[in-house]
Image: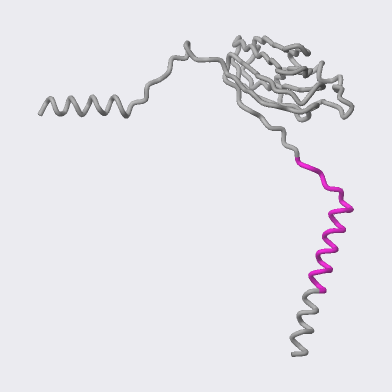
Amino acid sequence: MVRKKTFLALIFIIFFIPVQKSSAASEPFRFQDKINDTTSIFFLVALDINQTIQVNVSQEGGGYFYLFLFDFRPNTTNVNVDKTFNDEIFIVAKVYDTPSNPSVFYNATENKIHYIQVVLLKGGPDFFTLTSDIELVRFYLPSLPGYSWDLLILSLLGSTGLSILFLRRKKLAKITC
């Protein structure tokens, strides 16, 4: 009976308690994708005080990739239509690196969420691989299109007019039957 209980306990331990992977032996974070010119991809990471992060981008083709790290949530890509940057991006970014396999190394000065932006400015579409020594999370900028008021009001009036016309025809059809 004791052997049976010991055996069941051992089976329980083996199958129902997950084995934790050692964090010292973990592999670096890798992300691979293909993007077009002027396209940005964002990631976020929570860093503690004095925690360091190293992020590298390597391209397969001849694309001009840029890598930026911010200590605030970006609202725009800061990429202009003419395939240039808004100069403000170089002022507000904590660290950045320019083409030819960009790489950034950053030591956090406070507990904060940091944002990483990868931009392909020219030479695309191109495949790239982003590696980081800390796990990153993909972040999407909300792209909510704005509607012009005149179009909104015009479509509202048009749909209301069509609804009234449809209801009147239906009412007239009932009267004649």
Question: Is 26 in front, or is 144?
Answer: 26
> Image check: 106 left or right of 164?
left
How far across and how far down the image is residue 143, in percent?
75, 38
Assign the magenta stretch its main secondary structure. helix
User: Where's the C terminus, which quadrant?
Assistant: bottom right
How far across and how far down the image is residue 46, in percent?
60, 21
Give the image's coloring scheme: one colour
Taking the view exactly as shown, the residue that stands out farthest to the left is 1
Residue at screen point 65% across, 11% down: 109
Q: Give yes or no for residue 29 being in the magenta stretch.
A: no
How far across and how far down the image is residue 9, in percent?
22, 27
> Image check: 2 left or right of 174?
left
Q: Which residues are magenta?
A: 144-165
How many marks the image carries: the answer is: 0
User: Where's the N terminus, which quadrant?
Assistant: top left
Q: Give yes or no for residue 156 being in the magenta stretch.
A: yes
How far across and how far down the image is residue 48, in percent?
59, 15
Residue at screen point 74% across, 23% down: 126
Q: Quadrant of residue 77?
A: top right
Taking the view exactly as shown, the residue that stands out farthest to the front is 61
Question: Is 66 in front, or is 71?
Answer: 66
Residue at screen point 76% across, 88% down: 175
Q: Quadrant of residue 124?
A: top right
Residue at screen point 76% across, 30% down: 75
- Relative to 151, say whether 172 is above or below: below
